[in-house]
Amino acid sequence: MDAVDERILAELQQDGRLTVTELAERVDLSASPAHRRLRELERSGAIRGYQAIVDADALGLGFEALVFITMRLEDRDTVDRFESALTEVPHLQQAQRLFGDPDYLLRVLSTDLAAYQRLYDEHLATLPGVQHITSTLVMKQVVAERPLRRH
């Protein structure tokens, strides 16, 4: 990956709807080389896909909680069942397995505190293998959807 590829990635992270012609102009290439580089970035997996960034507040999902989960057991079967059950948790935006304690960090959205409590009681508290759950409420987003760069 060279500096031109990095510029292509930067432009697409700012606006994933650019046409190849627009992208080429922004990175000072003609359309054919820009298209070849774009296809190679997609083929290599540097670009995994394209999606719209949706505003959670606009959907009425302005209440955000970070949920820390410590597992009772961490054998393969328990972890597999837990991680499979996570896919059924509504409004779960991210789930990360961590080294150390806690074992997992979840990012969950809901409409308000009452909705989060229902989600907690009906989904999070019933996840298999959980020993302890701690929630922290997000006051505000300071940095979000920051473009990725190698340097």
Image (tube, rainbow, N blue to C red):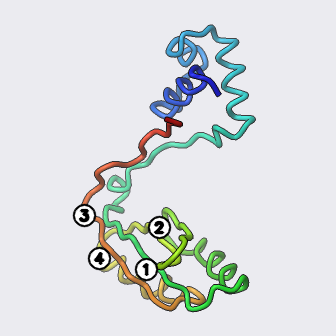
Q: Please tell me which of labels 4 and 1 falls first in the chain.
A: 4
Q: Please tell me which of labels 2 and 3 falls first in the chain.
A: 2
What's under tag 1, amino acid-wise? Answer: Leu
Q: Please tell me which of labels 2 and 1 falls first in the chain.
A: 2
Distance Cα–Cα, label 2 vs label 1: 9 Å
Where is residue 134 drawn, in percent x and y? 38, 82
Q: Picture quarter containing residue 112?
A: bottom left
Q: Looking at the image, which residue is at 57% across and 14% down?
A: 24
What's under tag 2, amino acid-wise? Answer: His
Instruction: Tell me if mark 4 has few (under 14), some (14-19) or many (20+) residues whose alpha carbon lies within 10 angstroms of its own.
Output: few
Distance Cα–Cα, label 2 vs label 4: 14 Å
What's under tag 3, amino acid-wise? Answer: Met
Distance Cα–Cα, label 3 vs label 4: 13 Å
Determine whether the residue tagged by mark 1 lies in a helix, strand or loop: helix
The residue beneath circle 3 is: 139
Determine whether the residue tagged by mark 2 lies in a helix, strand or loop: loop
Q: Which mark is residue 113?
A: 4
Residue 99 vs 72, above or below: the answer is: above
